[in-house]
Amino acid sequence: MPIVPEVPAHGGSQEDDRGAARTGGPLFRDETPRHQPQPQAQPQPYGTPHAQPHPQSYDAQPHPRQPHDPQPGPPGMYDPQPGTYDPQPYQAPQHQSQHQPQHQPQPRPHDTPQTPPAHRTAQQNPEPMPDAPQPAPAPQKKSAGRDLGAAIGVGLGLGVVIIASLFIVKAVFVGVIAVAVVVGLWELTKRLEERKGIRAPLVPLAVGGAAMVVAGYVRDAEGAWVAMALTALAVLVWRMTQPPEGYLKDVTAGVFAAFYVPFLATFVAMMLTADDGPFRVLTFLILTVVSDTGAYAVGWRFGKHKLAPRISPGKTREGLFGAVTFAMVAGALCTQFLIDDGAWWQGLVLGLAVAASATLGDLGESMIKRDLGIKDMGTLLPGHGGIMDRLDSLLPTAPVVWLLLVLFVGGS
């Protein structure tokens, strides 16, 4: 019989001892005993070695190291810190019992889903439902834009002064016209200097303007034209005493101011020279005031269509219709009862012309104020603005009324 060596069969105690004595663990990192079940791969927390691949053969290549993996120790050992050695032999992972709590891997910081800030804000401040009822805005009341109480009080006071001077002494009323002209020139030249840097000479304008009104009352139209020419010449000479820079614009503005304020006001003084002069002036004032009042009242109540939105946004076509209607009715009454030898149909024509000239005069000064970038020419009259803000409709209407009355009933 053959000689059998005294070597235990496979699986004997000697192999176990040999396996026990081999404290270094398996030869390869992925070498695990075949008779033990393989554990399920568990996600590793951030900073731990990657899970080992499933050993299909002893020739499987180990998992490549990543930059964040720690330095490995001896084969089969996990050394968390370089330079240390774990004396415990390698133990194959075992299945966890169903009664033992499984270790839940901690998610990596870069794997944690981040909620966008906009989404968090939307969750914290939810938008209202589109069907939610919204409170209706409170209806806005129309505003006149001025202190009506002060405007009415100042208007009544000016009316008393004008009527008293007009029917008591004519010369006093001429003085009232001259004062209004001088104050209006001061307001106009002051605003031109403040807003545009235009220095129209005020002294020759004030002296020439007052002289123009007196000349119109004493010598009629011829005296008014002569005074106008002399005033323009005085403006040219007076401006020569200053540096030449801006001379052309200064004298141009001065001549314009002389024509716009005192020369147009001279026609009021010329109306006064007739036998029924005070009633002609009164008719002129009534028609202008009624036209402005009708335009304001109708436009404020029914105005929807703008007349000249780029010049004066407050004026409407409905307001113009109100101005024409009110002025024609007042004109028929005034010419019938106040003007000598006047007829009611003449008053209708006169009222229509006054409504047109007063509206154009108001738009003209609105154009000037818009160019200067101001709301009022002054603050002398509470509720009205300045003197020029009250003369805007009167000045261009004066020559129209004077001319029509001369054509209808004569000059004197």
Image (tube, rainbow, N blue to C red):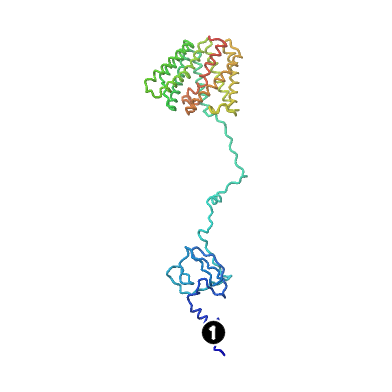
Q: Position of residue 317 (x, y in %)?
A: 59, 25
Name the residue nearer the viewer: 171 or 310. Answer: 310
Name the residue nearer the viewer: 148 or 26. Answer: 26
In this view, the residue farthest toward the bottom is 1
Q: Residue at x 46, y 66 (%)?
A: 70
Q: 10 Å neighbourhood of mark 1: few (<14), some, or many (≥20)?
A: few
Regarding mark 1 in the picture, which secondary structure is present there?
A: loop
Vertical side of 36 occupied by 200: above or below: above
Quarter of the image where the N terminus is located: bottom right
Q: Position of residue 31 (x, y in %)?
A: 52, 73
Name the residue nearer the viewer: 243 or 388. Answer: 243
In this view, the residue farthest toward the right is 131
Q: Residue at x 46, y 74 (%)?
A: 87
Task: Name the residue beneath numbered marker 1.
Answer: 8
Vertical side of 198 occupied by 407: above or below: above
Q: Is residue 343 left or right of residue 243?
A: right
Q: Position of residue 258 (x, y in %)?
A: 45, 18
